[in-house]
Image (spheres, rainbow, N blue to C red):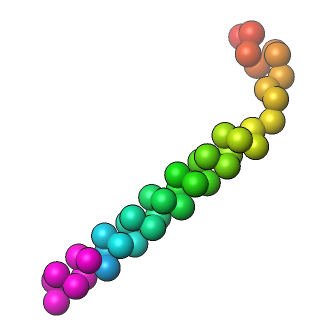
Amino acid sequence: MKKLLAMVLSGIGVLAAGAASAACLMIVIDEPEMPKEMIER
């Protein structure tokens, strides 16, 4: 029973990590240009 629970939780963790990294990649690609005032602080 514990082994099954561990497998399910690790599977959810792997999916969550994959979704988070894919979302992060999309955010980096879609990032708008930053105003120069913010860069030159």
Q: Residue furthest bottom?
A: 1
Does 11 sit left or right of 41 as displayed? left
The secondary structure that dominates the magenta segment is: helix
Which segment did they paint magenta? 1-7
Name the image quarter holding the C terminus.
top right
Q: Is residue 41 above or below residue 7?
A: above
Image mark count? 0
Who's the residue at 54% across and 61% down the image? 19
In screen coordinates, is 27 left or right of 36?
left
Q: Is 4 contained in the magenta span?
A: yes
Q: Is residue 14 left or right of residue 22?
A: left
To which quarter of the image does residue 40 belong?
top right
Question: Considering depth in this image, is 41 or 15 the residue closer to the camera?
Answer: 15
Which quarter of the rendering shows the N terminus? bottom left
Instruction: Indicate the quadrant where residue 37 lies.
Output: top right
* Residue at screen point 75% across, 38% down: 31
Residue furthest top in the image: 40
Q: Is residue 15 left or right of residue 30?
A: left
Point out residue 38 in the picture as x, y percentages from the top left corner: 76, 19
Residue 23 covered by magenta stretch: no
Q: Position of residue 35 (x, y in %)?
A: 83, 22
Task: Say which residue appears at 45% left-offset and 67% top-offset.
Answer: 15
Residue 24, above or below 13: above
Q: Residue at x 16, y 83 (%)?
A: 2
Q: Position of residue 4 (x, y in %)?
A: 22, 85
Question: Residue 5: which quarter of the image?
Answer: bottom left
Quick check: 31 above or below 18? above
Most extreme residue toward the left, as rendered? 2
